[in-house]
Image (tube, rainbow, N blue to C red):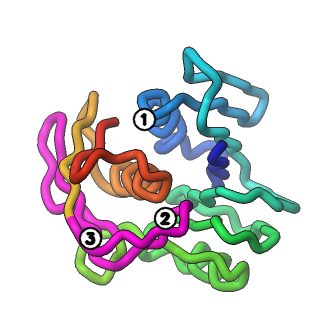
Amino acid sequence: MIKIILYGDPADTSLTLPLCRALSNHGGALYVGVNCVSEYSVVSPEFFVFETDRLDSCGADKAILLFKTKSSLYRPKITPADSVAAVAEYEDAAAAEAAKKLSVPLVTCGMGSKNCVSVSSVDEKSAVIAVHRPITLLSGKDLLPCEFNVATQTKMSGYPLMALCATLILSEKFDGTGITM
């Protein structure tokens, strides 16, 4: 099971529902948040999503620390593991500092080739995502720079689109050069 720690301000819901809906198409998700538990799966879910703004301890393997756009000032404490990665907006200095202190590889999302993941184009129900830097997937494999055609159920753009794509890429939930959300 892949664990996703959705980290940041609980009032920021820009990633919560889109993430769970996207994961429901890729093996399903069990979501645990503030006063809420929901299952987005018809079978035993492949993902566990824990939403929080404070993480005192985490020793999970095969985990993604997904920073929201409004990151918490409280820094998470994560026990080093081989297959842990972080995803954050390019300009989120707090998230970059946290990933560095935790010795966790950071996948940055933003416009331009300085980022690991960026959007090349977007329309009503599709997008093209560019991977500009090699990314080590949770399985340990390396993904070289490439592009993905993304099919979405609703129009998505900006950081939520890039963060969801980065999460699916890290989890190897893509088919060749295509991602479906």
136 falls in the magenta region: yes
Q: Is residue 133 left or right of residue 26?
A: left
Chain-order first, disc 3 or disc 2: 3
Task: Magenta stretch: give its range.
Answer: 117-146
Residue in the image at 17% along x and 41% along y? 126
166 falls in the magenta region: no
Dot 2 amino acid type: Leu
Task: Please give the residue where the numbered disc 3 appears in the rendered image.
Answer: 111
Chain-order first, disc 1 or disc 3: 1
Locate the C terminus and report the quarter of the image it occupies: top left
- Camera-nearest residue between 45 and 17: 45
Is mark 2 in CB contact (under 8 Å) with mark 1? no
Q: Is residue 66 left or right of residue 141?
A: right
Image coordinates of residue 52 in percent, x first then y, are 72, 48
Image coordinates of residue 21 in percent, x first then y, are 45, 29
> Rounded to the nearest whole Å, what is the CA distance between mark 3 and mark 2?
21 Å
> Rounded to the nearest whole Å, what is the CA distance between mark 2 and mark 1?
18 Å
The furthest residue to the top: 42
Image coordinates of residue 35 in percent, x first then y, are 78, 28
